[in-house]
């Protein structure tokens, strides 16, 4: 059996909206507040998302030595390089597995000024010398 449409309740609601009574005003205020909330909530959430993204972006750091992206760490977890702006030029020593990694201030070699010479040797050159690469 089909359900009947609630015309009586719609009429009562319409009468409350049109009647100049305190109940009508309260109902209009509540409906206006709900409508305003539904319209402004996406804008508010978008603004909060932009602010959160800016705060998150400020805490993300990229290591100048190895390029690893980390979240708020003062020292790179991969290579041990100091990521703080204040740590540049300050002596730092990080011990990883018994090896000591130190910064430039403690006498280490600056990676930007170091040069590694690589000679490319082909197997033909090795065979000509009488040695075998095997």
Image (cartoon, grey):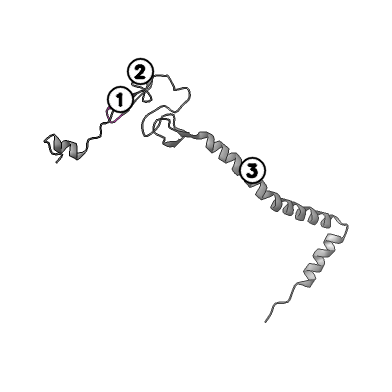
Residue bearing the label numbered 3: 47
What residue do we see at 27% from left, 28% from top? 98
In-image side of 42 versus 103 (left or right): right
Region of the chain picked out in magenta, as a range: 96-101
Q: Is residue 100 magenta?
A: yes
What residue do we see at 60% from left, 39% from top? 51
Quadrant housing residue 13: bottom right
What residue do we see at 12% from left, 36% from top? 131
Position of the C terminus by quadrant: top left
Quadrant housing residue 92: top left
Position of the N terminus by quadrant: bottom right
In-image side of 126 versus 69 (left or right): left
Q: Position of residue 44 (x, y in %)?
A: 66, 45
Residue bearing the label numbered 1: 100
Q: Main secondary structure of the magenta part?
A: strand
Q: Position of residue 112 (x, y in %)?
A: 38, 25
Quadrant housing residue 75: top left
């Amino acid at each position: 059996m089909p359900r009947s449409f609630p015309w009586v309740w719609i009429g009562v609601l319409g009468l409350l909206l049109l009647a100049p009574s305190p109940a009508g005003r309260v109902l209009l205020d509540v409906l206006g507040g709900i409508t305003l909330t539904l319209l402004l909530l996406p804008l508010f959430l978008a603004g909060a998302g932009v602010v959160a993204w800016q705060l998150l972006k400020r805490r993300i750091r990229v290591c100048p030595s190895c390029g690893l992206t980390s979240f708020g760490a003062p020292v790179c977890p991969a290579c041990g390089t100091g990521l703080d702006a204040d740590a540049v030029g300050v002596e730092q020593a990080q011990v990883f597995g018994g090896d000591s990694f130190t910064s430039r201030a403690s006498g280490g070699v600056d990676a930007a000024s170091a040069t590694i010479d690589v000679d490319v040797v082909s197997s033909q050159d090795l065979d000509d010398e009488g040695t075998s690469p095997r």
